[in-house]
């Protein structure tokens, strides 16, 4: 099996046959979402995240790109973009690894053992180093607010806290506050 596309298909099928829910984007096999559950014995336990995975053309020789779609409070994950600072994946990636390794080893290790000395989220790193209990409480708050199992299917990639409300969602009583318009 020398073809990267065959390997990509095989790894994706293996991931789909495991316990992970996989949603393929478009018709290709290079971009997809995986529903990832926070590891037991961690403040992330009970949370479910939608992870966007993008496989480069040279996969498995080059590591996949991984990003959280719904928010997570973690020193090594950018809170706004969901980008993951995963030196483990980028620097130690080998074609011997597959997609199941990412979700059974790399991501759980990232959540269990954050590295506050190399942060993408400086606030989370500072809080973790200053007050571990407060950090774990904030993680649990984020899990409750952004990573509920019933909500993960509804999370869209474009959704963000800065998103403008649509006309239907925008329920404003500005007219009542401002009064009638002067003729």
Image (cartoon, grey):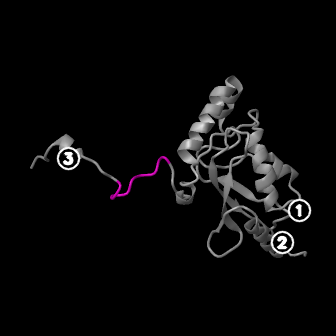
For marks 3 and 2 on the same chain, the one whose residue lies earlier in the sequence: 2
Residue 37: numbered disc: none
The answer to whether 59 appears left or right of 1 in the picture is left
Q: Is mark 1 on a helix, strand or loop?
A: loop
* Image x and y of residue 130, in percent: 68, 23
Give the class, few, some or many, for how many residues have Cα within 10 Å of label 1's Cα (few <14, many ≥20): few
* Image x and y of residue 62, in percent: 82, 61
Q: How far apart are marks 2 and 1 (CA)?
A: 10 Å
**Which of 110 and 181 lies nearest the eye of the viewer?**
110
The magenta stretch spans which residues?
A: 161-169
The quadrant of the rendering that contains the N terminus is bottom right
Q: Residue at x 60, y 34 (%)?
A: 138
Q: Do the residues labelled 2 and 1 touch (CB within 8 Å)?
A: yes
Q: Residue at x 76, y 71 (%)?
A: 13
Q: Is mark 2 on a helix, strand or loop?
A: helix
Q: Which residue is drawn at 71% across and 55% down?
A: 66
Q: Do the residues labelled 3 and 1 touch (CB within 8 Å)?
A: no
Q: Do the residues labelled 3 and 2 touch (CB within 8 Å)?
A: no
Most extreme residue toward the top is 130
Q: In which quarter of the image is residue 122?
A: top right
The answer to whether 159 appears left or right of 177 in the picture is right
Q: Name the residue under label 1.
A: 95
The answer to whether 137 appears left or right of 183 in the picture is right
Give the class, few, some or many, for how many residues have Cα within 10 Å of label 2's Cα (few <14, many ≥20): some
For marks 3 and 1 on the same chain, the one whose residue lies earlier in the sequence: 1
Q: Name the residue under label 3.
A: 175
Q: Name the residue under label 2.
A: 7
- Verify whether residue 145 appears in magenta: no
């Amino acid at each position: 099996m020398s073809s990267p596309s065959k390997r990509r298909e095989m790894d994706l099928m293996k991931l789909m046959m495991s316990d992970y829910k996989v949603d393929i984007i478009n018709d290709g096999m290079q971009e997809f979402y995986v529903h990832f559950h926070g590891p037991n014995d961690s403040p992330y336990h009970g949370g479910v995240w939608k992870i966007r995975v993008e496989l480069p053309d040279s996969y498995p020789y080059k590591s996949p790109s991984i990003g959280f779609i719904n928010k997570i409070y973690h020193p090594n994950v950018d809170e706004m973009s969901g980008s993951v600072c995963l030196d483990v994946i980028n620097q130690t990636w080998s074609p011997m690894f597959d997609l199941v390794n990412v979700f059974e080893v790399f991501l759980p290790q990232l959540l269990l053992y954050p590295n506050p000395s190399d942060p993408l989220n400086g606030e989370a790193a500072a809080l973790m180093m200053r007050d571990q209990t407060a950090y774990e409480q904030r993680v649990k708050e984020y899990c409750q607010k952004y990573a509920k199992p019933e909500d993960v299917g509804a999370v869209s990639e474009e959704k963000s806290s800065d998103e403008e409300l649509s006309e239907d969602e925008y329920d404003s009583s500005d007219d009542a506050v401002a009064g009638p318009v002067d003729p």
